[in-house]
Image (cartoon, rainbow, N blue to C red):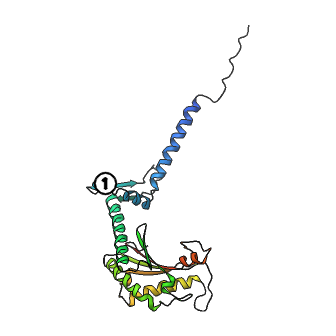
Amino acid sequence: MKRMEDEPKKGAPAYMNTYGDMMTLLLTFFVLLFSMSTIDAEKFKALASSFNASVSIFDGGQTIRIDNNVLENGMSQFPVKETQFSIEQAYQEAQETTKAEQDIKAYVKAKEIDDKITVQKSGDMIVIRFADILLFDTGKADIKPGAIPNLNLIGEKLREYIDQGYHLRVEGHTDNQPIHTAQFPSNWELSSARAIAVMRFYLEEMDFNPSKISAEGMGEYHPISSNATSEERAQNRRVEIKLSKSTS
């Protein structure tokens, strides 16, 4: 009697399980390498600044070194990029910015101009904000005489930080209402002229170091509030002075 052949086994061959596991592990390995090669410096600084209650862990100036030379063979080689982050330095910079914010806030309050000027920390910068109505008439870029005392008062404090190596960037901002005059064809020109007017005041009236101050017109494109109402549009019309150790 003829022997019946064994029925073929159903499903994938057994070796496919091992092969699938190997492919999964390879994928995980390369994802890990990719994530290590794209560490965000700002996020790393933010992480370091969260260790406020554990200053002792920074003793000795420990650093983390990230080497992106992840794969090499005889024919090709990935570019080698080395980035060193000093945890101690990042922590100190975050503490320094927080201290500067508190110092300027206390100064503004002591001079009784905290109802006219707001101060807040934004990343590694201190943002000092003036409403445009305090500095300029509608549609103009000439500083009001009544604004001079406030600019002088905050300027005295800013000078201290310039002497410590800080940089000032003056930014002009508008709302989304278009302007079209012979002097200001658009909000770009108006916002730029207002930023330059404040910068020139500090250069010409208070002798600020020209290499430590810059001006930039931002137009209507960086609002801090919706432009749906007149009150919200008023919030967007402003001049900001950004104080930081970086020039960017």
Outermost residue, left direction?
60
Q: Tell me how many marks there are.
A: 1
Horizontal and vertical percent position of residue 94: 36, 64
Q: Residue at x 38, y 57 (%)?
A: 50
- Left or right side of 45 for 75: right
Q: Quadrant of the N terminus?
A: top right
Horizontal and vertical percent position of residue 39: 44, 56
Outermost residue, right direction?
1
Q: Is residue 57 or residue 137 the one in the foreground?
A: 137
Q: Residue at x 43, y 85 (%)?
A: 199
Is 104 drawn above or below residue 9 in the view shown?
Answer: below
Is 227 drawn above or below residue 12 in the view shown?
Answer: below
Is 157 drawn above or below residue 33 in the view shown?
Answer: below
Which residue is the site of mark 1?
54
Horizontal and vertical percent position of residue 206: 36, 88
Residue 75 visible: no
Is 81 drawn above or below residue 137 in the view shown?
Answer: above
Outermost residue, top direction?
1
Q: Residues within 10 Å of mark 1 (few under 14, many from 20)?
A: few
Residue 136 visible: yes
Q: Is residue 128 or residue 91 the one in the foreground?
A: 128
Horizontal and vertical percent position of residue 52: 34, 58
> Is disc 1 placed on a helix, strand or loop?
loop
Quadrant in the rendering for residue 222 = bottom right
Q: Quadrant of the C terminus?
A: bottom left
Q: Residue at x 34, y 72 (%)?
A: 103
Q: Amino acid at mark 1?
A: Ser
